Image (cartoon, rainbow, N blue to C red):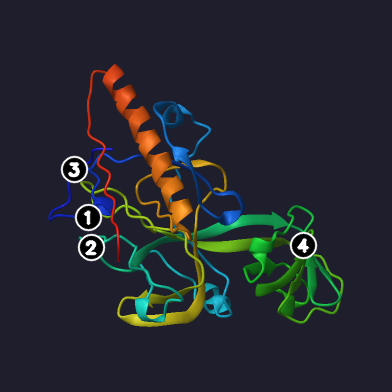
Amino acid sequence: MPVSDPAGSPRIGTDPLRFEPIFVVSNAGGFDNLVRVATLADLANTALPQAELSFFDVQGANGAALYLNGPQAGDTLTFPGATLSGPVSYWLEDTAPYLSNVFTVKQTGSRASGTLPQTLTGNRVQLSDYTFTTDDVNRWIVLSGFATTAYNGPAQILSVVGNTATLGKTISTLETGATWSFPIVEIQPVVSASLEHRYFPTRERTLAWQLHRGASLITSATSGGMTLRSTEQDLVRSVRFTAVTATMEASLDLMAVIRNGAANLQREAALENTTFTALMTSTYGP
């Protein structure tokens, strides 16, 4: 997708002027899986959203600190590599403004929300308009409108069964509140009118994170950060999609899919009286 080229010599993963396959990705269950290389028909299909990774959620023990300190537009989220649960060397960003792990907060919002949550004995809450999944375990939910004020505010979800969750706060009476929500932080994708948007480069879990306001550190956690999308449907994804395969067989299968998809795109381009070269690089050995 040709966009004006940033200054310098960015790698393929960050250069918007390179012609690369665009992927259709399935995000069912919160995990990214490559379906196929996209075709022109996919790009014209409005049923495939083109949402990118622009949201941040907290599932760790320090999630309440993030929400209680109220991230504001202009704050920055940083992800210090030294304390990450895994390496981020495949975050292919080596040219400004993509070379850092610093992301600017655009706004806060809700990944999901509803009304009339009910408390149950045994530190539980029940929602009439939402069914929990295993992805919600360790996530933080924010409750409001309960007569018992201790029930209001953020609480961590420890376990789920259907539309009932056990929370990490003491609940001993049956009450009905006003609202519930899963809060999220949206980052600012626009860094320059002449550059491509900047998103989280990959789908990540258990990230260490820090929230800064100017030069001040507001709060932080050594684990529990999670990047996520605004949708969990099939979607069109750019070359920023990163797949790490566990076996040589899976890697070769992925290469075959990309080669076939690129060949199909080449044929379609020929029909449109245009041409491009699909460059494949294979590395052998360490």
The residue where tag 3 is placed is 4
Which residue in the structure is indicated by mark 2? 94
Query: The N terminus is located in which quarter?
Result: top left
Q: CA distance from mark 2 to mark 3?
A: 17 Å
Going from N to C along the chain, the mark reached first, 4 or 1, is 1
Instruction: Give the Cα separation between the discs numbered 4 and 2.
Output: 46 Å
For the residues labelled 1 and 2, the Cα–Cα distance comes to 7 Å
Quadrant for residue 212, please give it. Answer: bottom left
Is residue 116 toward the left or the right of residue 234 in the image?
A: right
Q: How far apart in space, not on screen, are marks 3 and 1 (Cα)?
A: 15 Å
Instruction: Residue 199 in the image: state x and y as whole percent.
Output: 37, 55
User: Which element carries disc 1, helix, strand or loop?
Assistant: loop
Q: Secondary structure at mark 4?
A: loop
Near mark 4 (Cα within 10 A), the count class, few <14, some 14-19 or many ≥20, is many
Residue 256 % position (x, y): 41, 41
Figure check: 25 above or below 271 = below
Q: Amino acid at mark 1?
A: Arg
3D distance between C-alphas at marks 3 and 4: 49 Å
Q: Position of residue 34 (x, y in %)?
A: 48, 46
